[in-house]
């Protein structure tokens, strides 16, 4: 009698065949890794920071001035505080933030060769200068910092390399500038001026737009014999400069919410700044809008539309009387 089948059945019962699940485990593990990597990529700015030691944030400048009561500091403490103060000052400017009371004395004797400026005038002068310096870049040389102390006042000097483009005259400018910064006993800047210039380079560029001839400057079109009541004043001549209702912050919001990027410019990846000149009338209305430096592809026309449709501004004034004021405004077109 053949018992082979029965033996086979007994062997199958004793040693059942099990499927190999290693591939399943490998697939699950790989899926978990992919999920973790996706989470880190999408929701964590710096994935490697998870594996590094926690860093304590460094406060460059706080509510109390770093240079307050400098008479009680050692030279090394003053130098360290000066470096932090100047770096904080330029860091804020690079980010587009400029709040004069945070850094300057109530009356600044000298600011880039202007004199006796209060907070409002100092801010106006600063933004007017920056509108004529496209692509501004500054690197100050920490090792060049020198200072002297008289009682609680400090006079510091240092070198900085600056580069920018002058849209009004289409010039690329670069130079090494030596600054003198005088700081009072309250730790506020009371004077900031250039005392020496070297390695100056001015490169004249050919025009790439018909909006502005290369030798045309940002100057108002004023007839010499214009009557006083209709005279147009430059920003440097008025006591209170024109301002968008709500200031620079609200102006930026208005532009951002109303600007429509031209389709042609978007397709051709056209980006840059359009410089407009205009008159703020006595009643705050905007008139005589002109493109002083354009980038084309429909951006110039869109910039003019934005400004012409602007709500009324706060007009400029001299001795309390509203006057017509000539202004320059750069509008930035940047693809996201």
Image: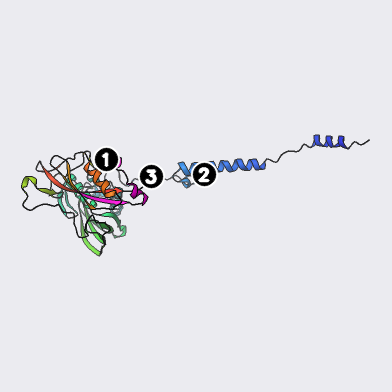
Q: Could you say whether the residue bearing mark 3 is in a helix, strand or loop? A: loop
Query: Is residue 262 part of the magenta span, yes or no?
Result: yes
Distance from Cα at disc 3 to Cα at disc 1: 34 Å
- Residue 174 or 316: which is nearer the viewer? 316
Where is residue 134? Give x, y as percent.
27, 54
Residue 41 visible here: yes
Residue 164 found in image quarter: bottom left
Q: Where, quadrant-wise, is the N terminus in this rendering?
A: top right
First along the sequence among labels 3 and 1: 3
Q: Which residue: 25% across, 41% down? A: 251
Highlighted range, magenta: 249-277
Contact between labelled residues 2 and 1, with CB atoms less than 8 Å apart: no
Q: Residues within 10 Å of mark 1 (few under 14, many from 20)?
A: some
Q: Tell which circle, 1 or 2, labels the residue nearer the N-terminal end.
A: 2
Residue located 21% across and 62% down the image: 196
- Verify whether residue 250 appears in magenta: yes
Q: Which mark is residue 57?
A: 3
Q: Is residue 1 left or right of residue 34?
A: right
User: In the picture, residue 2 is in which quadrant?
Assistant: top right
Q: Which numbered disc covers residue 254?
A: 1
In the image, which is nearer the foreground, mark 1 or mark 2?
1
Q: Closer to the camera: disc 2 or disc 3?
A: 2
């Amino acid at each position: 009698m053949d018992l082979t089948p029965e033996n086979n059945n007994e062997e199958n019962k004793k040693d059942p065949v099990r499927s190999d699940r290693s591939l399943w485990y490998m697939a699950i593990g790989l899926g978990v890794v992919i999920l973790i990597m996706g989470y880190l990529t999408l929701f964590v700015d710096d994935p490697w920071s998870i594996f590094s030691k926690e860093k304590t944030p460094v406060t460059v400048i706080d509510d109390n001035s770093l240079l307050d009561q400098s008479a009680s500091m050692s030279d090394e403490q003053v130098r360290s505080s000066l470096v932090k103060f100047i770096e904080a000052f330029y860091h804020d400017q690079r980010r587009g933030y400029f709040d004069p009371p945070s850094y300057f004395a109530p009356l600044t004797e000298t600011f880039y060769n202007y004199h006796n400026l209060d907070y409002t005038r100092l801010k106006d002068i600063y933004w007017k200068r920056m509108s004529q310096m496209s692509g501004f870049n500054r690197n100050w040389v920490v090792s060049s910092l020198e200072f002297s102390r008289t009682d609680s006042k400090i006079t510091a000097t240092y070198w900085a390399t600056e580069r920018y483009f002058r849209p009004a005259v289409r010039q690329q400018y670069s130079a090494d500038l030596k600054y003198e910064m005088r700081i009072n006993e309250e730790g506020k800047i009371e004077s900031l001026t250039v005392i020496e210039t070297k390695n100056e380079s001015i490169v004249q560029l050919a025009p790439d737009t018909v909006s502005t001839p290369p030798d045309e400057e940002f100057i108002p079109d004023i007839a010499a014999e214009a009557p006083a009541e209709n005279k147009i004043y430059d920003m440097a001549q008025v006591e209170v400069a024109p301002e968008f209702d709500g200031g620079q912050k609200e102006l930026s919001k208005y532009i951002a919410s109303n600007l429509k990027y031209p389709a042609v410019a978007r397709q051709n990846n056209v980006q840059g700044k359009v410089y407009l000149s205009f008159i703020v009338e006595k009643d705050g209305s905007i008139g005589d809008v002109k493109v002083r430096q354009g980038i084309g592809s429909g951006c110039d026309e869109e910039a003019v539309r934005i400004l012409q449709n602007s709500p009324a501004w706060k007009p400029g004034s001299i001795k309390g009387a509203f006057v017509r004021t000539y202004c320059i405004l750069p509008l930035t077109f940047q693809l996201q």
